[in-house]
Image: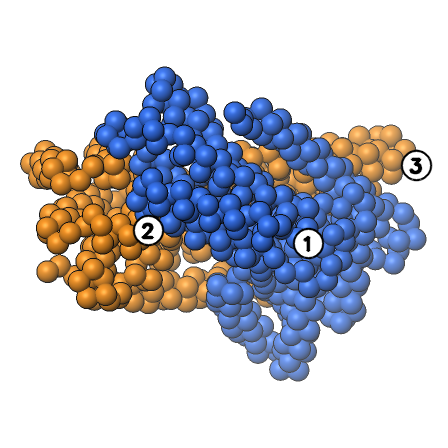
Chain colours: A blue, B orange
Amino acid sequence: DISCLPIISFLREKKRNRHGIRKVIHSIKVGVALVLVSLLYILDPLYEHFGENAMWAIFTVVVIFEFFAGATLSKGLNRGIGTVLGGGLGCLAASFAQAVGGVGKAIVVAIAVFIFGTAATYTRQVPNIKKKYEYGALIFILTFNLVVVSGLRAEQVLELARQRLSAIVMGFAICTFISLLVFPIWASDELHDSLVSRFEDLACFLEGFSKEYFVNVKEKEKKFCGNFSSNCKLVLQSKTKDESLVNFARWEPWHGKFGFSYPWGKYLKIGEDLRDLATTILSLRGRLRSPTQASETLQQSVIEPYEAIMASLAWTLKELGESIGKMIQCRSEETIVPKLNSVRLELSLILTPSTFGTNLENIDRLGLASF
Amino acid sequence: DISCLPIISFLREKKRNRHGIRKVIHSIKVGVALVLVSLLYILDPLYEHFGENAMWAIFTVVVIFEFFAGATLSKGLNRGIGTVLGGGLGCLAASFAQAVGGVGKAIVVAIAVFIFGTAATYTRQVPNIKKKYEYGALIFILTFNLVVVSGLRAEQVLELARQRLSAIVMGFAICTFISLLVFPIWASDELHDSLVSRFEDLACFLEGFSKEYFVNVKEKEKKFCGNFSSNCKLVLQSKTKDESLVNFARWEPWHGKFGFSYPWGKYLKIGEDLRDLATTILSLRGRLRSPTQASETLQQSVIEPYEAIMASLAWTLKELGESIGKMIQCRSEETIVPKLNSVRLELSLILTPSTFGTNLENIDRLGLASF
């Protein structure tokens, strides 16, 4: 009798605690970064150098310091590129306006603001750019606008741009330093762990659900249903989260077990397969719970092989999840493939293999994807 | 012979065009707002009033002008609340630091920055606050920090805060005006339309899929598969989008067909039901496509009632979608309920009603939810 309910709830509890602690660590890191960047104002020599532009460093820290190290890096680089591009084009537009002079100056500025604002806002909405560079485009619009209108009043636009840029670089340096070197929270780890835990969720769902179903048949009792199926539904909704984590993970430097050019794209693919599998499992459950089916086709004689098959599938999922989790070669040839073949055989003996057919194909694909 | 393939592709094309046009309109609106707010710099009398703080108005416009009117309003109000709270507490902390004086002043400022920065960052990560007020918390941190460190150098913190606040209010007013009154793009409309089109997607999937399947049986041809099933998968992934749209729609004032306190929560509920239904339909498809099942149980005699049932279900979905779309009372008692009952009867005659059982329950619930 295999039951993973206490284990999984213990793991969940631990995971929740760990997540809570990470939130506290992140908050403290932000606090420290804010104090460090405030020193630009507080300490006289630094203030003499940066002046009011120290504000831009504070602004940078508040806006780009994100939970995951990769997210901070990606936002910081976006901000850097946006600032440089926006500032450069803004300076050009401002000097052009200055060359025109008189009333024309204001008109040139207004036209430049309109054209660049509209074009950059449109670009921001293009799906591919939106995914990765939306923040950069926002900063481009902001910087361009500020520089071009400041050019109307301030005499030394270039000097102003240089000072602001150095303040922003200062803020970025503080963020990167604290985010990457002090208790870093990696998006890569999160992605890796969440994928592995989804294998476990599905395996436990299969186990808990065979228990639920057969207990239901035997004793008309339901215990495991709600909790497990909500985990299964969470698997279905993991796409957006996966995509953003992969986006961040790509920016993260070599660390821990993840080297350079680690194949993050494969995590997306395995995630997709797991979602397909969850769809199948959820619907299978819906099917088995329908009362007519139970009384008609599932006689006592079917229950035992059925339970064995469920256990095999759950075991396979766990095995795959574990090998991905520990990043070791899965013992597929020796153990998993023969097991799946025997399951397939057993199924063809007792039932029309329709639903399980899909199931098995998926698991085969999962097996291949994990090497 | 019912086919909605050309109709739906035409509608999709039209929808894509309309979406493209809306993007252009949004971009132009942002451009106009930026020009208007730049006038604070360009026109001398306005510049004399606002001075360098006009920058804050530009900043506000760039950051809060979002695609949907509701999103702009929600971000603007968040920004307002964050600024007022952060500014107020910042002023208090700054005057306290000034009262301490000397070296203690800098220490008080640093401690205040650390405590409020950490606490606000932690609050920002609490799920419920993250969903609705994350941006407000960000602005709170930013404003608090800027005000409290400015207090070290500037003499009139209150005057500074007042000027910045009035610049921000100016930016907010410009955004709200343009976003709500000039070709407004409502999140409510988007939510309503996307829900209705999901009913259509599922209905067409059922039709196209019965066609695909039976054509497959008869002539071994696959036509409709890929496209329809990807629409069905999009339905599965609609949760995040729905939630954010509901969040925005709640902020939108009375307009068009949507009055005050319109029941947006019900859209979430119907969306959830549609996702359940899509899960069932997708798995049903997987089951029917499995070759053993087809050759064994689905003899020619079953095909006709099967097609009739699919058509009934698709019709029901369309009817429900249409009544929600046009916001009219659905003719449920007269038409839908008898039809569903006859489908149920027919099913119990020809097959074990397992899979369809789930299906029907969902549709019943959908029927109830739409009144």
Q: CA separation, marks 3 and 1?
A: 38 Å
Q: Chain of mark 3?
A: B
Question: Which amino acid type is shown beneath numbered disc 1?
Answer: Gly
Q: Which mark is residue B286?
A: 2
Q: Chain of mark 2?
A: B
Among all residues in the image, which is located at the extreme left? Answer: B334
Among all residues in the image, which is located at the extreme bottom? Answer: A99
The residue at which mark 1 appears reads as A70
User: Secondary structure beneath disc 2?
Assistant: helix
| Residue A109 x, y percent position in the rendering | 58, 72
Quadrant of the rendering where the C terminus of chain A is positioned: bottom right
Most foreground residue, A121 or B41: A121
State which tag comes first along the sequence, 3 or 2.
3
User: Secondary structure beneath disc 3?
Assistant: helix
Q: Is residue A2 left or right of residue B13?
A: right
The residue at which mark 3 appears reads as B103
Q: Is residue A139 visible?
A: no
| Residue B151 x, y percent position in the rendering | 78, 41
| Residue B285 x, y percent position in the rendering | 29, 51
Residue occupying image coordinates x 37% and y 29%: A303
Most foreground residue, A43 or B2: B2
Q: Quadrant of residue A102?
A: bottom right
Q: Nearer the viewer, mark 3 or mark 2?
A: 2
Most foreground residue, B100 or A344: A344
Question: Which amino acid type is shown beneath numbered disc 2?
Answer: Gly
Q: Which mark is residue A263?
A: none
Q: Is residue A197 left or right of residue A61?
A: left
Number of numbered discs overlaid on the protein picture: 3
Residue occupying image coordinates x 66% and y 77%: A92
